[in-house]
Amino acid sequence: MTVNRLGMVVHGGRPEATDAAAAVRAWCAEQDVPCADIDVWHEGGRLNARDEVEAAGDPDLIVTLGGDGTFLRGARLAAESDALVLGVDLGRVGFLTEVSATAMRAALDAVREERFDIDSRMLLALRASRLLEVPPGMEALMEYGRGPLLPPPRVRSDCRIDEDWGVPLDVTALNDVVLEKLSRDRQVSVGVYVSGRLLASYSADALLVATPTGSTAYSFAAGGPVVSPRAEALVFTPVAPHMAFDRSVVTAPDEPVGLRILERSGQAAVSIDGQLRGVLGPGDWIGVYAAPRRLRAVRLGPMDFYGRLRERMNLTDAPAAVADGSPAPLWSVTTPPPGDIAHLALLTALDGPPGAP
């Protein structure tokens, strides 16, 4: 593809990210590609995603230099403008990022020469009973030294506001949408609806709806399932619920999850991909559903999600299971698959680079 303009989201707290940013600028200078830093920590307040990408000149490729948190910020910008996003891994977990800093120049060359695949990721959209707002004084409590909060989401201009369906908010989530308690000594009481039908009323520390991508983030920490990022589903997970039923529920993309704050509940914060975006009270509700648009991430080779899961989560084998020695691979990695399973996405050592015949 022709990279007409490149934008960077850089983790300013990491010296290695600063060095990597200099290398990206050098590559852009060699290729005569305009390059702009997308500064998400503007003095005096945060811009919304649309304003940020416009200030950067609407890049068609966004490169994130940091960890998964930096990638989430870049993904928010890329989803807004339908740009490609390439994550350079300089963090500690690295479920979302694609390449290491040492492979960054080769990755940029591969994108320019169209030697890559597009990893299409599901996003979440949001409707609410009213606009989200952050009360005065909350920002100072929630900064944690990270800079000013994102502004409240605006109303989507391409969707209608309806008394029954609520206000369509111009916001997307790659990982999750979370409704969580504000007071340490008071849980939130929430009625949870799937496809408009009441599932159950929960009293919990938090309730979250995650994408398959976000299943290894907060949802996983709360006991939720690991879901392949290639799956299409919404994952509802309660956090520390005061009830016997504490399991996650996995719904289809066309089965939205509604969360209504009950009358005697305390206030609840709404966080989107870990960013506080508003505070709601009793009677308010949000509806979470699969977004019509998707994230387009650069994929340079087969994604070994389960190998990465084993590595990142430090999975170890049961001693009794390996007492007789290491097991042989279930499938051959050195020969082509037979005809009856050739249609499956089995990765072998014979697989060539993306785009190879």
Image: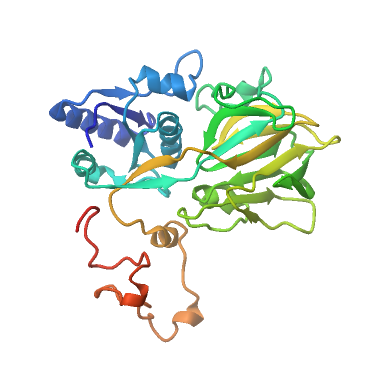
In the rendered image, residue 113, in percent from the top left (x then y), is placed at 18, 41
Residue 130 sits above or below residue 356 on the image: above
Is 299 drawn above or below residue 82 in the view shown?
below
Q: Which residue is found at the position 41% from the left and 46% from the top? A: 120
Q: Is residue 338 left or right of residue 162?
A: left
* Residue drawn 50% across the image and 75% down it: 318
Q: Where residue 81 sits in the image (x, y, percent)?
A: 40, 28
Q: Quadrant of residue 181?
A: top right
Instruction: Give the residue furthest to the bottom.
Output: 324
Q: How many marks?
A: 0
Res 119 seen here: yes
Quarter of the C terminus within the rendering: bottom left
Q: Residue furthest left?
A: 30
Q: Is residue 308 above or below residue 175?
A: below
Q: Position of residue 54 (x, y in %)?
A: 39, 19
Position of 277 compared to 45: left or right? right
Quarter of the image for the N terminus: give it. Answer: top left
Name the colour scheme.
Answer: rainbow
**Looking at the image, is 180 positioned above or below residue 326?**
above
Which corner quadrant of the image does residue 352 belong to?
Answer: bottom left
- In front: 207, or 355? 355
- Residue farthest toward the top in the current orientation of the protein: 44
Q: Position of residue 234 (x, y in %)?
A: 59, 49
Q: What residue is at 55 percent from the left and 25 percent from the top?
A: 158
Of 3 and 43, which appears nearest the observer? 3
Q: Is residue 41 visible?
A: no
